[in-house]
Amino acid sequence: MSSGVDSSVSAALYASKYPNVKGIFMANWSQTSNCIERDWNDVQRVCADLSISCERVNFEKEYWHQVFNPMIEMYQRGLTPNPDINCNKFVKFGKMIEYLTDKYQNSSKKWWLVTGHYARVMKHKPTGEYHLLRGYSQNKDQSYYLSSISSQTLSKILMPIGHYIKPRVRELAEEFKLHVSDKPDSQGLCFVSQDAKHFRDFLDEYIESNPGNIITEDGKIWGKHRGLWYATIGQKSSISMPQGDEQYNGVWFVSEKNYDKNELVIVRGSTNPKLFKSRAKVINFEWMITPEEISQLDMNQLTFQYQNVINEAQSSTFTVEFKTPVRALAPGQSFVIYQDCRILGSGIIDETFS
């Protein structure tokens, strides 16, 4: 339970049907203790209203070594990581599952971990396997951020909120008379307090500045950046270009990070061809399906988060070609393959090519 409306409604749905439901709350980042204590108080109040107990656990060590440090290292290299994916893989559905397994290993009772994620875990009747699927709510679907969790844990996970759309979840919160029914959705990373003025300000505390030039393709220098990690491919440039000059007026966007020269390259226009890539190298790919299922896949029928993929991918490292060039692909981001609404696996974008 995070204290948000989604996990609170999940708890209410099960507590209304089963007598042995218990809440569990993770406090994993001591630097945001004020925020954690506020959330813990909300969780305790929800649990009291539902007449269930709640346990508080701390996996800060796992956060630091498996989520936070890798994120910092990737930003230092100028990459754009997805820390929430590692958070889910190693902590929420990694250390948490390990903790619960150890806790109940000598118990005769079965247990499941219920979460408030907008995704679905469903049993495939013909095979008896558990599949991870997109949530019904397209605007809230969180399956992308769950794409790296172990397929071995799916049989222990329940995600009731994935079968609802957000407005209905709010209605359920009101029906259950939860005091968090109108609580705003969390927009921060799982280990960064919303009290942080800006995520870049937060990173400034951990990454030394490494200034370099911001240039246009003709090599002209227009300003300085504080570090390659300070920009994301496809984002609007922070440089004010001379609007009276026809060669440089308009809105400019980050198209490239030159790691060797520590330079950011900007181009004019949000649809500039330089912002689009036709191929990407994917590394550390992990399938959530069996080798037999992989061999039977029609690669032309697969999708990743935005476009169709057309090449065959059998190993943990491969190159993907896109039927339609994709805008703002950033090395470091996760690459997730779907078949219809089912997640088949995920890896990391290592390089992109025009």
Image (cartoon, rainbow, N blue to C red):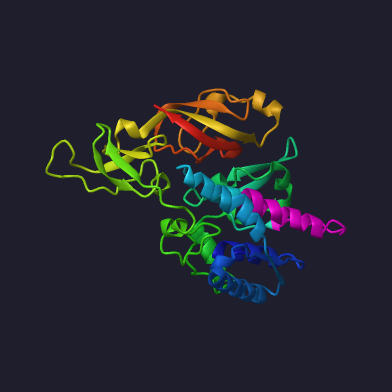
Task: Look at the image and give the residue range highlighted in magenta.
Answer: 87-113
Q: Residue furthest left?
A: 244
Which residue sits at x=59%, y=48%? 86
Residue 101 position in % (x across, y down): 79, 55
Residue 97 magenta-drawn?
yes
Which residue sits at x=50%, y=24%? 310
Question: Looking at the figure, which quarter contains the C terminus?
Answer: top left
Q: Is residue 159 visible?
A: no
Question: Looking at the figure, which quarter contains the N terminus?
Answer: bottom right
Judge by depth and name the residue closer to the eye, 16 or 141. Answer: 141
Q: Residue 52, relative to residue 343: is it above or below?
A: below
Residue 42 position in % (x across, y down): 58, 73
Prevailing SS of the magenta stretch: helix
Residue 124 position in % (x across, y down): 70, 39
- Quadrant of the rendered structure where residue 233 is? top left
Which residue sits at x=30%, y=42%? 214
Residue 186 position in % (x across, y down): 50, 62
